[in-house]
Every structure is written in structure tokens, then in C-alpha cells.
Amino acid sequence: MDDRSGKKPPPRRRLRSGLIVLFSSAWLAVLVAGWIFPGSGGSHAGKSVEAIRWTTGTWQRWDMFRTIPNLRSYEVELIGETASGEKRTFGALLPELKPLQGKRALRNHYALNRICDQPDEFFEGYVAQAARALRRADPEVVRFTIRIAAQPTRSFERSREDGRLWTTLTSEAGPFPVADD
Amino acid sequence: MIEEEEGYRGIWLKPVDARRYAWTRVAFAAAALCQLIHLWPYRNGLLGAGGLIPEEAARSFNPGFHLPSLLVIDPPWWPSLIIGAGILAAILLLWGKWARASLAVVFLVLVVTVQRAPLASTGWDFVLTNFGFILLFSPLGADWTPRRLWRSRRKAPLGRWEAGMLPRYGLVLLQIQVAVIYWQAVFERMGDRFWRNGEFLSYYLLSHHSRFAGPWVLEWEGWLKTATYLTNLIEIAIPILLWIPVTRKAGVLTGAVLHLGIAAVSLDIGLFTIAMLMAYVPFLGGLPTEDWDD
């Protein structure tokens, strides 16, 4: 390509331009592939692609509000129990055992919802961390239970029958022993 | 002196006013700064060693290289140091000081946060990390501080050499990223029955996101159904409106109404609005120049 003087640009500039076109073309391919093969824990794009995406922060999974958010509220608390059977209530936020702070603390809401949703390594790790935190905060507590109070939205057909928009479901997990530090 | 390019190479190499990159840099830095300030209260719970998410689980969740493992996360002050460094770097980036290094720090802090606390991540986290990655390889217009940028809007139109010219590839990649975000989001919803039958917005307004949840939602179901379908149409249209110069202002206005509307009825996703409005800046031209086309 010629510049306005009619002369060819120097080799260094041609190399730079070539690298720009190469990088841009490669990233265009990544973006198109990201649209066709969205990241989904490796099930769509393959593990090696997912590995690159997670390492570089370029995960192409744009599924915000893919379906309805079905909870009105989600409250979690830890119910500690002493050796004498006395119950004491603690917040679920670690490490300070603070309460969940309602709807405005979105990330805590997401994290606890996803942690408590299924008994995987995140849940097991949370239980272990909570046990350590309780031991530090109140050495008299010897075991604890995780109490969850969720308010899912009811279907509109049922809501129109009785006027109740949400229902309340409570569940408990545990008891879990409190660990020594 | 920048050569004129044609054809495929011209898509990436056509010269544009350097101020477009500068405005993009400023917008990204401002959005990242908001994000990092928002993360400050969460730092111990999400990044700390005794927080909600154990490091071992986060590491095994990540199929790639786990950056947080490079960092010592046991001292209780470490999360404060990481987020604090990110905030400082975002301010420097906004001003254009040591722009590339500042951007690298901001980008790394954003990625570390996502990797360390994957269960607490949100859609706008990935808007920022994807934009940050593209900007790492793009011009940043670092010569243009926010003050100089603002003043240049009022002066007599700049000549192309006074403004500085840069190949537009970074802006083009960011624009394509915006299209991918919107179109994939709509594509992902096609299989969901609540989007198909128009009930999504009604359920959204009864959820924990909603500022105004109540029985009124059932009475307005018809209008909300229309709004649900309209949302998808708007999201398909926005990238096209932004790309075409004649409709660009309409695209910005439409997107702003959409995202500000979402923020108005929602309690907790203002940063999503900030991130998406930031994403429109790479489309914007219209800077005062002499008779050279942009």
C-alpha cells in the first residue's frame, strides 16, 4: 500500500500493519466462534477453548437473564448449637458471620444461592470455612445447621386464584461439626 | 504518516481520530473504577482466604490458569491491596498516565476477581474483562487527558495531523464484541418459554431484582408481554443502529432508554447499565474535524 507521497511504507510499518490485521482477524474468529459456541462449562466449545477463555477473562457466554429470576428473596443463616443444646444465630457471610444484607448485596446473594444449590465442592468448602469461622467467633458452639429461607415466585395462574405472589420455602442442611482451628 | 488501506485490510487499518480511542479509554476506565468501588465491600467475603468461596474450589472450577494462585491471599489485608491497586490504576488509566501499564493492572484485577469468586460473577464482569483484553492490544490515545478531550470539543475543528490518527482495528473489535453480546443474549433466550410467551418481564418485576414488586404486575401483564418482545427486538437492532452512521444517534438513544429503564426498575444492577453504555463509546465519532472523513 502506498502512502500519500506515492512511496511504499517502510518495512517496519508494513510488519506492524500485518500484525494488526493478523491479530484482528484472529480475534474476529474468536468472537464469531464465541457467538456460535458460547462457553458453557466446556460442553459447547471444548475444554482447551474454555481454558483459554477463563485464563484471559474472555469468556463469551452472554446469557444474562436467559430465563426468569424466580426468587423474590433468599436468606441464609447459620444456627449454632452449644453442648448444652442452646441455639445461637449467626449470619452466613464469611469471614465475619454477617447477615446477608438483603437484596442489595447481589454478589453475596448469587454466591450463597449457587453454593447452597447443590452439594458440590463449593458447598463442602463453605461448610468447612463456616465451621472455622464459628469456632473463632464462639468457641462454645459445637455444631451448626445452615437454614435457608427462599421465596420463589408462584405461577400467575395460582397467584390469580388466591392473590399470593410468592411462597416461602425453608430448608436446613446439617448439622455439621464445628472444627478446631 | 498513516497509509490509506483498502478492502479487508482497510477494515482494520483505516485511520481514525485518536480521540475516539481516548474517549473509549476514558469510558472503560470510568466503568472499571465504578466496578472496583462496587467490589470494595465484597473484598473480604469473596477474595479473602476465609470467605464464602474456598480457594481450592475456585481453582478446580477454572479450566485455565488460575491467576489468584500467584497471589498470597492469607493476609487479611491482601484483598484490600488488590482492589485498592485496581482503583488507583483505573484513575491513572482514566487520566492517560502510564496508560498501558495501568490498563494491565486494571485488567488483571478484574480477571483475578472473576477467577477467585466465579460463583459471584455477573454478566457485566465479563463485559469489562472482554473490553479490557481488546484494549490491551489497542491504541489508547494516552496523549489525550479527559480535560484536553473536553476542551477539544469546543475549539475550532482539528486538522487530521493535530488530532492524531490511529488504525481503527481496536474500535472495530469492540464494536463486534457489542454485537456478539446482544445477539448471543437474544439467541440464548429463544429456547426459554418465558421469553417465548412474553412473561419474562412480569416475573422479573416480581423477583429480587425488582424495585417495585407487587400485585400491579398481574394487572399490567399485557403491556409487560409487549415490552418483553420489544426488548429482544431492541437488542437485535441496537448493534445495527450503532453501526450505520445515519442511525447511530437513534441507536445510542434506544440503548440508553433500554438500559436506563432496566436500572430504574431494578435494585441492584446499575453497573450492568454503566458497562453497556460504556460499550457504545467505540461507535461514537462526530468529533469536530476539518474536511477529512471519519
Image: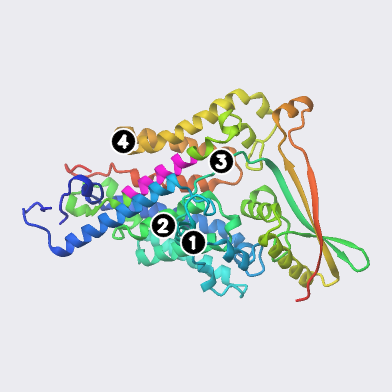
| Position of B74 relative to A126 (above/below) | below
Q: Which label lies toward us, 4 or 3?
A: 3
- Residue B180 belongs to magenta span: yes
Q: Is residue B190 left or right of residue A160?
A: left
Q: Which residue is mark 3?
A: A66
SS at mark 2 in the image: helix
* Residue drawn at (51%, 64%) of the image: B112
Decide: few, some or many residues near mark 1? Use Cα within 10 Å; few <14, some 14-19, many ≥20: many
- Would you name the residue on which mark 4 appears? B244
Q: Are marks 3 and 2 on the same chain?
A: no
CA–CA distance in space, label 4 to label 3: 28 Å
Range of residues picked out in magenta: B172-185
Looking at the rendered image, the disc whose residue lies closer to the viewer, 3 or 2, is 3
B130 in the magenta segment? no
Which of B36 and A133 lies nearest the eye of the viewer?
A133
* SS for dot 3: loop
Q: Left of A26 or right of it: where is A38? A: right
| Residue type (three-letter) at the residue carrying disc 2 | Gly
Q: Do pointers 4 and 2 mark residues of a single chain?
A: yes
Instruction: Write the residue at 17% across / 53% down.
Output: B161
Amino acid residing under circle 1: Val
Q: Secondary structure at mark 4?
A: loop
Name the spot of residue B230 as percent of width and height, x first: 50, 29
Task: Kindly identify which residue carries mark 2.
Answer: B132
Q: Chain of mark 4?
A: B
Question: How dense is the environment of label 3, judged by Cα within 10 Å: few (below 14), some, or many (20 and up)?
Answer: some
User: How many numbered badges does the structure rendering display?
Assistant: 4
Left/right placement of residue A116 relative to residue B168 reads right
Q: Position of residue B36 (x, y in %)?
A: 52, 59
Label 3 to label 2: alpha-carbon separation: 24 Å
Report which residue position mark 1 lands on.
B111
Is residue B213 visible to us here? Answer: yes
